[in-house]
Amino acid sequence: MYAIAVIRYRKPLEEVLKVVDEHRAYLRDLKARKILVASGPLEPRFGGALLLRVENADAALLAVRDGDPFVKHGMAQYELLPWLPTIGLEDLDRA
């Protein structure tokens, strides 16, 4: 199953940037574990988005959210959206 996580900053960008390196290290680990397909900031920069591949949507998505340094440091909140793509699914499965 796939999911989209929309991340919205809860603090000013200047504060969020202090945690960005830790957040990106966390995302690189998710990518290495084949959980994260793609990620990046939104424009304008009020948050970001993640495209995730998960086995058990509820537990896995909560674990992704709760493990993020942005959440641990109170910098951001997540909106977790399980997603059932129909067009392009084969391309995602290859990614």
Image (spheres, rainbow, N blue to C red):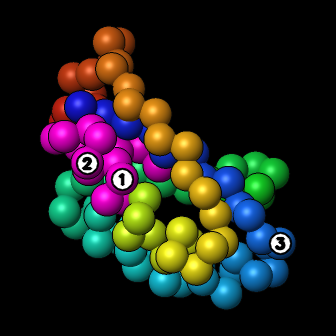
> Would residue 44 be found to the left or right of residue 18 on screen?
right
Residue 81 drawn in magenta? no
Q: Is residue 60 left or right of residue 49?
A: left
Q: State the residue lying farthest toward the bottom.
A: 18
Asked if residue 27 is positioned above or below residue 81 in the image, the reply reads below
Quickly name the residue at label 3.
12
Horizontal and vertical percent for residue 81? 46, 33
Instruction: Tell me how far mark 2 sits from mark 1, CA to CA.
Output: 5 Å
- Furthest residue to the top? 86
* Picture quadrant of residue 67: bottom left
Please give the residue where the numbered disc 1 appears in the rendered image.
62
* Label of residue 85 in the image: none
Q: Position of residue 72 (x, y in %)?
A: 51, 76
The span picked out in magenta is 50-64
Q: Which residue is mark 2?
A: 59
Which element is circle 3 on? loop
State if disc 1 and disc 2 touch (CB < 8 Å): yes
Q: Mark yes or no: residue 44 visible.
A: yes
Choose the circle earlier in sequence order: 3 or 1.
3
In what quadrant of the picture does the N terminus appear? top left
